Image: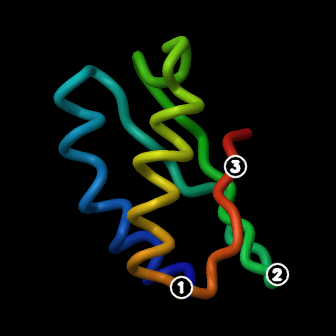
């Protein structure tokens, strides 16, 4: 599942990089929780939670339906 999540993140990265940010995959738990670290300008952006939930999580869940939640650490 980790490889599929990483492939989904490759679709998201260009959008994040365009704004000076990025995302790092930290862990994928057995119960379907994806743990990410937002980097660059995404790490301190006041809109980062919306980007995480409405953008990154949405795309990951489309690509990997068994993912239950995406959280930033």
Residue linked to disc 1: 65
Give x and y (percent) for residue 43: 53, 22
On screen, 40 above or below 35? above
Image label count: 3
Label 1 CA crowd tier, 10 Å (few <14, some 14–19, many 20+): few
Dot 2 or dot 3, earlier in sequence? 2
Residue sitting at the far right? 31
Q: Residue at x 41, y 76 (%)?
A: 62
- Marks 3 and 1, Cα distance to the nearest angstrom? 16 Å
Residue 71 badge:
3
Out of 57 and 40, give the one closest to the viewer: 57
The residue drawn where x is 49% and y is 20% is 47
Give SS at disc 3.
strand
- Residue at image coords 66%, 64%: 34
Mark 3 vs 1, N-terminal side: 1
- Image position of 1 (left or right of 5): right
The quadrant in which residue 16 appears is top left
Q: Nearer the viewer, mark 1 or mark 2?
A: 1
Mark 2 neighbour density, 10 Å: few (under 14) some (14–19) many (20 or more): few
Q: Quadrant of the C terminus?
A: top right
Viewer-proximal residue among 51 and 18: 51
Figure check: 72 above or below 20: below
Earlier-in-chain disc, 1 versus 2:
2
Which residue lies under the disc numbered 2?
Answer: 31
């Amino acid at each position: 599942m980790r490889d599929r999540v990483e492939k989904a993140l490759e679709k998201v990265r260009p959008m994040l990089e365009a704004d000076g940010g990025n995302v790092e995959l930290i862990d994928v738990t057995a119960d379907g929780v994806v743990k990410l670290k937002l980097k660059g300008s995404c790490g301190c952006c006041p809109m980062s939670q919306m980007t995480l939930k409405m953008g990154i999580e949405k795309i990951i869940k489309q690509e990997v339906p068994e993912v239950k939640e995406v959280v930033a650490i």
